[in-house]
Image (tube, grey):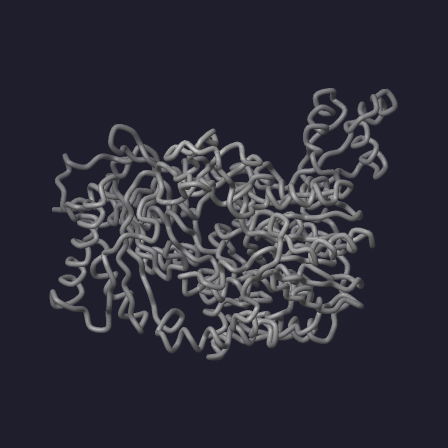
């Protein structure tokens, strides 16, 4: 008689669960399903989740018992369990890996669910009595703030908002016995105030709050139109109904300002979840939402997996942003999973953007989404900025900056206002070139040039991180005529500092914001005074800078002639978002665009009809060419030390697909291209190949992948490569 065993999914790239015996010698029952267990695996142990119980084909002697049952009851509720199952099926990823992706680190490692209670700080009687004896400094300033409000403790969320960096001072006070950390009663929260909405905002809020059950919306609002206020009022309504709300944002840098805005307007604590937080903080936010104590969560893409036992509303801000697509591991799209969860929970889902993705646009045109329009800026006196195109052909440029642009920057600074100079390349220059023989500095591990950094002193690969010093002479011809070619943010910053030596210049890119809260700190450096921001696309996403009146795009020509079919969409989104930073208050804004191709049709469409006209034309082009969203793609990638191994695996995978899903020669309704080398054939020392699958019908593509994917793990060629499946890829690079 076959044994009844536990089927355990482990966070490993393996498609099937493993069989284990219960640790207590009893028969397995369905009460184990959904519980974490620690099991022997290889020479050590691993934490997995029980996904089923049933008979095993193995003999009893071949099975090992679990080492420990970690949960008395299932960790996840039925809805989230079902969502993870859908993600595993749709993205053809092992359930154990999806499950592990959805959990905070401590829970993945087998630790118990943490104490999620909110805490606050207050002075002890000894601290109050000895307040005057404290020396001047941050601890005393913090103690005085607490003393001024009586004995009531300050919530840690309030301290984060009003006293950034307070924790070290609080610990020093606690070490002296002058302060203590205490649990906060549930009712003690920052109290919000109501908002005054314009007609368009009020109409959007009414549509969202009036929905019954699952209702997907596209909140299509121009930059500065007050989408956050709509989110806030919709969240307030959900809270009044006793429900939870989830707000996704595309970047870690946007979470702090979003939480601060919501915290001022909501009567509950707003929790955060993103990779910039410590594991413990993420685990507490997860546990708070799971218990229902947490009511509002703001997070980046991984927060889409947070428990929502009392879900009432899901919002995705800047839904067009590519950051919502996971580019390694489980290649899920948080926006799409948010829609799935909204349907599973039976709640409204709001996708907000001034530049909706073409996939979302098509959904709205087919009325699968309800479009809510915010046509004008919300702030009194604010209006759309004027746009000026600078034709820089045959013009003398200073580090890529036209004379008219430099004059406009000077006038803006003289008025006491702020400037944004956008250059979407970090570093000093994209390439180091020998002027005599044409040699350029290559990465030794990638098929890509090294980027010049440190004002020309070092070379760095932006793909694998390889670093090298700048050579004194050309390795090929010995010439000393090595010159940085092109402009990065460092070079633009250098040129502006030379031209405006008295101006405050703040560079915002990945190099300057790597520290904790780096983006928020850099944005705060100019304060209420004049100055210049120089940066990459990090500056284009949702930041509200009232004194910023001039936005300048140094170069956009790379996007006009890219081989990527999504280039027009991304260029339009980027230009509109950059332009949207200017003139968001009563001061008028101006946008200056430098280009060598002022007559380009994409640019003409954008200037004459805005993003709506450009996106309509691009959708028509996509439909004519049968490109997404009018076709459905999956990309099978492979990489290996030897290019032959990567190509051989993809060839074998294609053959297995034809046998598993077709007649050995074809799969009706399915086409493929490849195997072919990836656009970057070698990265980080490994050869890269890919196989593209496409179909006009999603069900055909999914059926083919479902029939073949599990068999790919068993292919002999799979042992020599790293491979992955990317369903609905947004990047073919």
Residue 447 in view: yes
**Left or right, 443 with reference to 104:** left
Quadrant assignment, res 280: top right
Residue 149 appears at what percent x and percent y? Answer: 83, 39
Q: Which residue occupies 68% across, 28% down?
A: 168
Quadrant assignment, res 675: bottom left
Front-lying residue, 542 or 73:
542
Q: How many marks?
A: 0
**Left or right, 62 with reference to 121:** left
**Left or right, 422 with reference to 655:** right
Front-lying residue, 92 or 490:
490
Identity of the residue furthest to the right in this view: 132
Residue 553 appears at what percent x and percent y? Answer: 61, 57
Quadrant assignment, res 318: bottom right
Identity of the residue furthest to the bottom in this view: 366
Residue 568 appears at what percent x and percent y? Answer: 48, 66
Q: Which residue occupies 79% across, 55% down?
A: 411
Front-lying residue, 394 or 572:
394
Residue 365 appears at what percent x and percent y? Answer: 49, 79
Seen in the picture, residue 160 relative to 169 is either above or below; the reply is below
Residue 233 in view: no
Seen in the picture, residue 58 relative to 317 is either above or below; the reply is above
Front-lying residue, 593 or 609:
593
């Amino acid at each position: 008689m076959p044994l009844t065993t536990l089927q355990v999914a482990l966070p490993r790239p393996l498609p099937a669960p493993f069989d284990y015996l219960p640790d207590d010698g009893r028969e397995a029952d369905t009460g184990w399903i959904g519980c974490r267990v620690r099991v022997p695996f290889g020479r050590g142990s691993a934490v997995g989740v029980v996904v089923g119980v049933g008979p095993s084909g193995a003999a009893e002697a071949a099975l090992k018992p679990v080492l420990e049952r970690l949960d008395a009851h299932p960790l996840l509720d039925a809805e989230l369990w079902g969502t993870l199952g859908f993600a595993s099926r749709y993205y053809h990823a092992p359930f154990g890996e999806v499950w592990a992706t959805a959990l905070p680190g401590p829970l993945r490692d087998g630790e118990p669910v943490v104490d999620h209670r909110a805490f606050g700080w207050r002075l002890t009687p000894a601290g109050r009595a000895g307040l005057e004896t404290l020396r001047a400094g941050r601890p005393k300033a913090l103690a005085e703030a607490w003393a001024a409000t009586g004995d009531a403790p300050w919530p840690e969320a309030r301290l984060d908002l009003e006293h950034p960096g307070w924790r070290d001072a609080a610990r020093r006070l606690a070490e002296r016995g002058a302060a203590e950390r205490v649990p906060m009663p549930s009712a003690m929260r920052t109290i919000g105030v109501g908002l005054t909405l314009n007609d368009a905002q009020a109409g959007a809020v009414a549509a969202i709050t009036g929905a019954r059950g699952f209702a997907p919306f596209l909140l299509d609002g121009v930059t500065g139109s007050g989408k956050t206020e709509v989110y806030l009022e919709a969240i307030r309504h959900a809270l009044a109904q006793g429900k939870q709300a989830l707000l996704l944002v595309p970047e870690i840098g946007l979470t702090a300002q979003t939480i601060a805005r919501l915290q001022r307007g909501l009567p509950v604590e707003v929790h955060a979840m993103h990779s910039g937080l410590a594991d413990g903080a993420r685990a507490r936010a997860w546990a708070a939402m799971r218990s229902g104590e947490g009511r509002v969560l703001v997070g980046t893409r991984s927060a889409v997996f947070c428990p929502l036992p009392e879900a009432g509303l899901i919002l995705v801000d800047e839904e067009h942003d590519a950051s919502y697509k996971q580019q390694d591991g489980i290649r899920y799209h948080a926006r799409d999973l948010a829609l799935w969860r909204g349907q599973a929970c039976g709640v409204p889902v709001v996708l907000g953007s001034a530049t909706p993705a073409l996939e979302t646009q098509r959904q709205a045109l087919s009325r699968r989404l309800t479009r809510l329009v915010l046509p004008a800026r919300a702030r009194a006196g604010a209006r759309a900025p004027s746009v000026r195109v600078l034709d820089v052909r045959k013009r003398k440029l200073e580090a890529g900056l036209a004379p008219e642009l430099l004059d406009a920057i000077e006038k803006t600074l003289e008025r006491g206002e702020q400037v944004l100079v956008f250059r979407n390349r970090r570093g000093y220059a994209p390439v180091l070139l020998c002027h005599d023989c044409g040699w350029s500095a290559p990465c030794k591990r990638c098929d890509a040039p090294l980027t010049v950094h440190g004002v020309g002193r070092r070379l760095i690969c932006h793909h694998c991180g390889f670093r090298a010093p700048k050579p004194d002479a050309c390795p090929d011809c010995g010439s000393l005529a090595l010159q940085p070619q092109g402009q990065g943010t460092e070079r633009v910053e250098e040129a502006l500092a030379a031209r405006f030596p008295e101006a405050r210049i703040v560079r915002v890119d990945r190099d300057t914001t790597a520290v904790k809260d780096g983006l928020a700190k850099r944005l705060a450096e100019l304060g209420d005074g004049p100055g210049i921001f120089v940066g990459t696309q990090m500056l284009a996403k949702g930041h509200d800078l009232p004194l910023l009146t001039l936005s300048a795009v140094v170069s956009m020509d790379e996007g006009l002639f890219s081989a990527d079919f999504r280039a027009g969409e991304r260029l339009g989104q980027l230009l509109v978002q950059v332009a949207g930073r200017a003139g968001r208050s009563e001061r008028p804004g101006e946008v200056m665009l430098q280009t060598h191709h002022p007559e380009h049709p994409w640019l003409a469409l954008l200037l004459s009809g805005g993003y709506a006209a450009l996106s309509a034309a691009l959708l028509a082009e996509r439909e004519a060419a049968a490109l997404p969203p009018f076709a459905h793609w999956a990309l099978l990638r492979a990489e290996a030390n030897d290019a032959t191994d990567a190509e051989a695996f993809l060839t074998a995978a294609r053959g297995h697909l034809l046998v598993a899903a077709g007649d050995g020669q074809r799969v009706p309704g399915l086409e493929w291209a490849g195997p072919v080398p990836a656009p970057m054939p070698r990265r980080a020392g490994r050869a890269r190949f890919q196989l593209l699958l496409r179909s006009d019908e999603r069900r055909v593509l999914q059926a083919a992948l479902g029939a073949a994917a599990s068999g790919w793990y068993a292919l002999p060629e799979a042992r020599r490569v790293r491979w992955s499946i990317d369903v609905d890829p947004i990047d073919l690079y």
